[in-house]
Amino acid sequence: MRLCNPRLNQVEAALLDEVSADALMSYTEQVAAKVRLSGSDEELESFRYVQRQLEDWGLSTQLLFHDGYVSWPGAATLQIEGLGDIACITHAMAVSTPGTSGGLVYAGRGRPADYEALTVQGQIVVIEGLAAPAPVKEAIRHGAVALIFINDDHFHEMITSPVWGSPTPDQLGQLPTTPIISIRRPDGERLKQHLLLHGTAAPSARITAEVDTRWRKLPLLEAWIPGHEGEPYVLFSGHIDSWHLGAMDNGSANATMMEVARILSRHGSDLQRGLRLCFWSGHSHGRYAGSAWYADSFWHDLRERCVAHVNIDSVGGMGATVLTEAFAMAETADLGKAVIPNFAGSRPSRSGDQSFLALGIPSLLMTLSEQELEPGVVGPAAITGSKAGGSGWWWHTVDDTVDKLDPAFLARDCQIYLAVVFRLCAERVLPFHYGAAIHEYRSLLEQYAARAGDLFDLAPALEAAQTLKAAYEPFGSEVERLREEDHHGRPCDPDQVKRANERLMALGRRLIPGNYTTQGPFAQDPALPIAPMPLLAPIGDLVAAGPESDVAKHMLVGLRRARNRIVQDLMDATRDLI
Ligand SMILES: [Zn+2]
């Protein structure tokens, strides 16, 4: 049974036939037998189950423990004057309160423009949607004392902090400073009607909430195939911690990682480089605390040796027919297209354990299979930022149970991951296309230059990008030649292949941080929406501010530094190719 439609060779086709839907469902049931709060005993049981299975299949494993700052939501109550008690939940990284009161103010979707005609200082703000970091930050910035989110018909668990990984001392001030709760849509509709009836004399509300936020010991499971010390490897990662039973998010993904590991462990001789699997804790309750700790703790090893990061989250859902929008970079999109029919890909955002962008490691996939878009649905699509309908209504709810999985779709998704991971591990020449990445880089610079007009000169960056393009062209042709020889089974010069792969890796290290981060290789940008080539994003505000304003002059200080960094990255990338 072959469910995906990749352009595969015989070895790959045979591998995919080894995927077992029954085995995938069985692993999922084991992993998702209990609620897996980050750092809990129940979560550790699932880690140990996965470790035992991987060792039974002959993989080398290591269960690490590290400190992580995580947050478990507890009980919450909401009383509204004139409406009485309303069922609610509170959220990770929100503030506990024995009782916070205030007048209610409705702020639509909670975007900056929604506050233009509102005064929310000292009030409780009511917002449509999921309790995501961006609307939380905006409401608190406007002086709200508490937040109420109106979800859809189900309570969706969320983490409300934008801080990526466990916070540094400087970042503690970026954690939410108010209680935050969510209510369901029918109650939200009643609340909105109530507010309309009261007009300007807003009714008050009282919120209580318990959130247990502290440092905990978190497990982190590593496993290797074939495990050669000191050689390049592909990182394949997913979180084990969950909201509620988390059968889809992320039991089915853990099962997929296990099945890929089981199959590839029998084909180690076909691999050109190692596969490292990492199972994280701290994703749901610590905003990627596990993967961020791993990036910090093994920074040099990752920088020197990790050729690609493949992440997996929430696969095999019933009705998940949209396969076209998973994360892909310009340099990795062709690999996605080779394996996934009609794949378009979405630019990686600050979500889903993308803790390795700052290191310059190419990334592919995350949430792979999604629902069709249902107009008007407030749900997971709002979080993933994708054009599809997200992960299903049960995502982050008590209803994320094994009956929400479709075994055939789970096997299909596993085959896609198996094909992608296999190609990354088995292709002699790394399957990245930096011609596309350089083209994207230049296009972004051209767009920013057009927007900046006379206000800011990006000519040095455009010239440096042109120089890189010219330097890349002969190298790109050489890579194509080596790839062709390999695909036709002709022997390649191992030294030429090694040199080409080193250069491909070096291009990622130079170009990815500037394209995806503001803070560079040693830090983590917050889990908030981020523009392409984000250091130049202030150009939009510069134009709005006008050339002679003080605020424009402040912006130009930062933009000059950004331009220096981008030019330097491009010059270094060019030098690596010569
Ligand atoms: Zn997840």
Image (cartoon, grey):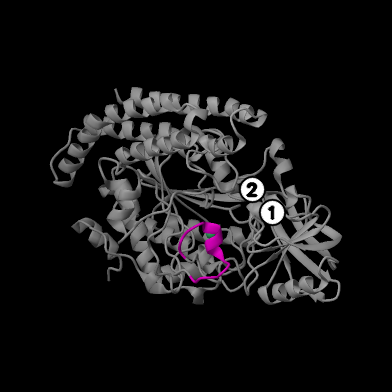
Q: Is residue 517 visible?
A: yes
Q: Do we see residue 266 in this rendering? A: no
| Amino acid at pointer 2 | Pro
Q: Quadrant of residue 473?
A: top left
Give the distance between the C-alpha atoms of the residues marked 2 and 1, in whole angstroms.
9 Å
**Percent coordinates x, y for residue 301 in the rendering:** 46, 34
Instruction: Label 2: state its secondary structure.
Output: loop
Q: Say whether marks 2 and 1 touch (CB < 8 Å).
A: yes
Residue drawn at x 31%, y 56% as measured from the top left: 419
Residue type, label 1: Val
Instruction: Find residue 146 and report its horizontal and vertical position in percent.
Output: 78, 58
Look at the image and give the residue range highlighted in magenta.
Answer: 374-388
Determine if the magenta segment contains residue 153: no
| Left or right: 409 as drawn, with respect to 494 | right
How dense is the environment of label 2, judged by Cα within 10 Å: few (below 14), some, or many (20 and up)? many
User: Residue at the spot x=64%, y=54% of the render?
Assistant: 111
- If the image is split into quadrants, where does the N terminus sit? bottom left
- Along the viewing direction, whichever of 36 and 564 lies nearer the viewer: 564
Camera-nearest residue between 21 and 341? 341
Residue 387 magenta-highlighted: yes
Query: Is residue 159 shown above or below 357?
Result: below
Q: Residue 257, how many percent across, how many down?
A: 43, 58
Task: Determine the secondary structure under disc 1.
Answer: helix
How many labels were placed on the picture?
A: 2
278 relative to 182, above or below: above
Which residue does the numbered mark 2 point to in the structure image?
Answer: 162
- Say the numbered circle drawn on residue 136: 1
